[in-house]
Every structure is written in structure tokens, then in C-alpha cells.
Image (spheres, rainbow, N blue to C red):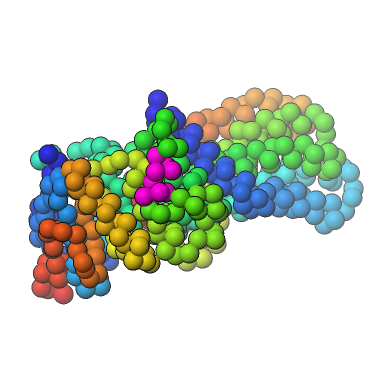
Amino acid sequence: MTAMKAFWRTVGRDLQLALRQGMDSFTAVVFFVLAVVLFPFGVGPEPAVLARIAPGVIWVAALLASMLSLERLFQLDYEDGSLELLALAPLPLEAAVGAKITAHWLTTGLPLIVAAPVLAVLLQMDAAGFVALVAALALGTPLLSLIGAIGAALVLGARRGGVLLSLLVLPLYIPVLIFGVAAVDAAVFGFAVRPHLMVLSGLLLAALVLVPWVTAAALRQALE
Amino acid sequence: MSAFEGEALSCARGGRVVFSRLDFRVRGGEALVLVGPNGSGKSSLLRLMAGLSAAASGRLRWNGEAVAADPTAHRRRLHYVGHLDAVKPALDAREILLFTARLRAGGGKARAAVSAALETMGIAHLGDVPTRYFSAGQRRRLALARLFVAPAPLWLLDEPRTALDAEAVARLDNAIAAHRHGGGLVVAAMHGGPYPPEATVVDLAAFSSPLQ
């Protein structure tokens, strides 16, 4: 019971920090919108072309936007000593990691899900794919935060960690990208969406179980 | 009465032996002061005592039981104040202490405990000021105020007087004396005195590896 309370307090503290730092937490969604908006300029305003590439463009932009904010997930806490105090709190470090990932998803993943349908309209995506897009993002963005957390913990203390982080994390994002785009494409072309969403759910469940342990181990290593 | 002891502790950092075969023992009401030149392993020993890092060899015991057997219980009974103040510039002093209080002691009287802790370190008037306006000494006072928001018997302090003025040092000394009077244990790394009264002084230079 107390562990649950401590978990939500840690989530609350990270949300409070994100809100106080204002623009910082909105960088991800602003980047997401800008990156997608650039595509009609790049490939031309042809509706058929835009509609065809819309799912892929939205997903790739979501991947990059989510990664943009990952570096700060543990870095600031590591530099100012807060991470040591979290590691010494009665709450298990695994739970504290879970709390930080939850807060990261609430401040970066959730705004992406809200912004995505608007961008889909902008790219003239077939309306049949909207529900699948939101469903796939709802399963996929937590997965991005979870997988990214491992990378963010592993690069702690490394110089130029941001570049290293993208090298580590982007290859691991590929399955999320494949099944996320496939779900939307399936909906647009009238195939079954369910199998793709089931795969994403499976990946999400596996990550929920494994990631806190792996990340906590990496953090302990960084604190040694 | 609580007792915290270390037996034949060795520590290696970056492939180099920092200290080896170190024994210590602190009981309730006692203070242990770690001294030694820079790099002799004072901070390393404190981190090891806190469980932040693992000893290359040796054992830590609390009341005769191995600390490694129950790390969560060990974390619950200690406060560690390291070199870093863990102060978030975007939050104010009260918010920072409230988080520690609720995380460690849980709900209830957290607000009263925070006010008392601010009072103890003489920063009650700064409770609602965002900490980005704090001086180094004020940040240090805030970091030390964490000691009072949730009681724990074992204090591990890494050069606690850094950046503190004479008034704050006096407050800290009083707090340490009160903590010891109440049966608490204090381990502190220090550069120069005055040391807490009747403290056991361990010079880490005596345990540095002869091989290096």
C-alpha cells in the first residue's frame, strides 16, 4: 500500500517538474507536429501520395519525438544527486524507474496520441485508419518510453550520450514501427487490424515486466 | 541499542585499490569521523555504507545481521547526504522536502515535519522561494534539512560543512548532538575539526593499499 503511494508520489513529482519547466516537456509534441508538417512541403501536395505515406510519416515522427526527450529521463536526476536519493528510498528502484517512465509517457507519449489524428487529417489519410492509428499509438508510445528508458539508463555518465542513445534505441524501435504502421495500413485497406494490435500488446506486456528490472540494474551500475 | 559495523572492508575504484582491510564499529549515540587526504576513499566508504556501491570484499553488519541480507531495511534506516545537494531549481524548498518526507515516512504529519526541518536548519523564511535563487550554502542547508523530515537512526554525511557559514555549522553540530543523544549513529567524512565530541576518528590513509 505504501509502496503504491510512493510510486504515485514519484510520478507526481516528475509531472510537477515537467509542468514547471514548461516548454521542456512540450518539445516532443512540437517537434512531432513540425516534422510531420514538413512532409507536404518535401513530397508535394499530391493527396494520393500524402495519404499513402501518412501512417509511416506519423509513426517515424513519433519515434523521433519520443527519443528526443529520452536523454533527460535520468540525466538531470543523475547530475544533481536526486537519483542517489531515489536509489536509497524505501521504494524499490524498479518501482521508481516505473514511476519515471510513467511520467515520461504522460508528458510526451500522451500528447502525441492527441496530436496524431489532427496530423492524419492534414496528410489526407483515409478516415478508415483513424481508430487504428490512435489504438496503435496508445499501445506503441508506452512501449517507446519503456524501451527508451533502458537506453537512457545505459548512456548515463557517457559524454555525448544523446548520439549514443539514438544508436542504441532506434534499432529496438523497429518492431514497434513495423506493427504500428501495419495496423493503420490494414485498417485503410480493409484487412484485419487486430493481429497487429495483439502483437503490440504482447510487446508492451513483455516490456512492462522486463524493462524496470533491466533499467534499475543499469542505473545501479551508473551509480557505483 | 543499535550497532553498525564493518569487517575487513576493501574498495576498488577503476581497477585501483582505494583502501583494504578496514574495520569500523559505531554504536547508538556514537559518532565516527572519517579523515584522510583527497582520494583516500572517504566518500567511497560512505557510499559503500549506504549500499550505493558494493565492497570488493568484507561485510557490513547492523545489530550483528548482514546488511546485504535485507537492503531495503538498510535503506529505510539511513540518511545519506552526499556531495550533490539533489536540489531541483524549479521547485521550492518546501516542495523538495515534502517529496522526501512523503517518500520516506509517508503521509500524515509530513507538512509539520517539513516546517520543523526548515526551522532546524534556519531556512524557515525561504520555504516558498524557488531554489534556483538559493546560494550554495542555502542549498546545502536544504540538503541537510532532509535529515529531519523522516527520522532514521543512521546518518551518513559526506563533508557536511561544505559551503556552510558559522551559524549553520553550529546548527548542524547541535543537530548531530541531539541525534546522538536520542541514540542515533553518525558517520561523517570531514576535513578539519572541530570534530563532534567523543567521536572516533578513522584515518583512511592508514588503510591505503601498500601495493599502489
Residue A40 to residue B70: above or below: below
- Residue at 54 percent across and 49 percent down: it is B128
Q: Which stretch is magenta? A: B113-120
The residue closer to the viewer here, A167 or B79, is B79
Name the residue rendered at 71%, 30% in the picture: A132
Q: Exactly how many numbered labels are in the figure? A: 0
Give x and y (percent) for residue B115. Answer: 43, 43
Asked if residue A212 shows in the view, the reply is no
Viewport quadrant of the N terminus of chain B: top left
Where A198 falls versus B59 (above or below)? above
> Residue A70 at what x, y percent from top left?
55, 51
Is B134 situated left or right of A19 in this image? left
Q: Residue at x 89, y 50 (%)?
A: A45
Task: Tell me the residue at 50%/53% (across/down).
Answer: B126
State the predominant SS element of the stretch in magenta.
helix
Is B119 magenta? The answer is: yes
A18 left or right, relative to B114: right
